[in-house]
Image (cartoon, rainbow, N blue to C red):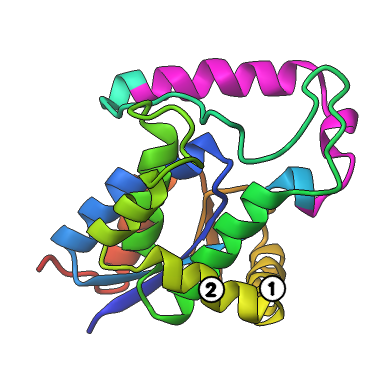
């Protein structure tokens, strides 16, 4: 029997990106379905989060995510531009967020089609692997989406035509994420049990094996 796990994911989270290669490997090796469910990052979900956080929080994430990428051999560089429009001096988050709204709604659309994992990996890799400058410009995202079997222009048009539909999907994801018992990303949820972080994937596999997870 194919097991199923939810993955709550943010396009701004370096750890969400770093979890994707192992997640794809899981799907290849095991009889497993991963339902990637995009949520907005903390900067949008929790207004004022970074102003309340310890100043060392962001600095540590930059340090740690970079060394995790080096350790795992994953190409990595923080996106240029940042998918969240934020003044990193004052930590003020802009009211208008064109990048993260577009990305997360596109991810919600791919979720509705049951193909959010390959779509998200293609887009996230373009943003995070350091191979392009200005991931939001030109045809970078369109070519990435095409490789995953998507027509980005058609997706953008559909989302623009009915943004509330995709906002409802995101809101549902955020509600279920909050109910899972954790607030961070990436969070895997298997049978209502949360596993937070890319470093908990082995523990997740152990738990799923106790429930009958089989290799393909």
Residue 49, horizontal then vertical, whole percent = 84, 39
Q: Does the image show residue 198?
A: no
Residue 171, horizontal then vertical, whole percent = 71, 72
Q: Quadrant of the N terminus?
A: bottom left
**151 and 164: which one is in front?**
151
Residue 207, horizontal then vertical, whole percent = 37, 61
Q: Is residue 54 above or below residue 10?
A: above
Image quarter of residue 158: bottom right
| Callout 2 crowding tier (Cα within 10 Å): few <14, some 14–19, many ≥20 | few
**Residue with the mark numbered 2:** 157
Q: Is residue 33 above or below residue 57?
A: below
**118 and 58: which one is in front?**
118
Q: Is residue 56 magenta?
A: yes
- Type of secondary structure dominating the magenta stretch: helix
Residue at 58%, 48% in the rendered image: 185
| Callout 1 crowding tier (Cα within 10 Å): few <14, some 14–19, many ≥20 | some
In this picture, residue 119 sits left or right of residue 170: left
Residue 167, label in figure: 1
**80 and 185: which one is in front?**
80
Cα separation between marks 2 and 1: 15 Å
In the image, which residues are magenta? 45-69
**43 and 24: which one is in front?**
43
Residue 64, horizontal then vertical, whole percent = 51, 20
Q: How many numbered tags mark residues here? A: 2
Residue at 16%, 60% in the rendered image: 28
Q: Quadrant of the C terminus?
A: bottom left
């Amino acid at each position: 029997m194919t097991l199923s796990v939810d993955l709550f994911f943010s396009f701004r989270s370096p750890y969400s990106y770093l979890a994707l290669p192992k997640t794809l490997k899981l799907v290849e090796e095991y009889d497993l379905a991963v339902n990637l469910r995009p949520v907005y990052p903390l900067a949008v979900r929790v207004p004022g989060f970074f102003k309340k956080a310890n100043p060392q929080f962001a600095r540590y994430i930059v340090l740690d995510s970079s060394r995790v990428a080096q350790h795992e051999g994953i190409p990595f560089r923080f996106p240029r531009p940042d998918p969240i429009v934020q003044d990193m001096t004052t930590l003020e988050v802009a009211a208008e967020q064109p990048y993260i709204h577009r990305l997360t709604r596109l991810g919600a659309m791919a979720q509705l089609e049951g193909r959010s994992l390959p779509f998200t990996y293609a887009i996230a890799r373009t943003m995070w692997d350091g191979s392009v400058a200005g991931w939001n410009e030109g045809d970078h995202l369109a070519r990435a989406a095409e490789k995953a079997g998507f027509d980005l222009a058609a997706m953008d048009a559909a989302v623009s035509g009915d943004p509330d539909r995709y906002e409802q999907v995101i809101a549902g994801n955020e509600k279920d994420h909050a109910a899972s018992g954790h607030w961070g990303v990436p969070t895997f949820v298997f049978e209502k049990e949360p596993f937070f972080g890319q470093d908990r994937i082995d523990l997740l596999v152990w738990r799923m094996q106790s429930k009958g997870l089989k290799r393909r």
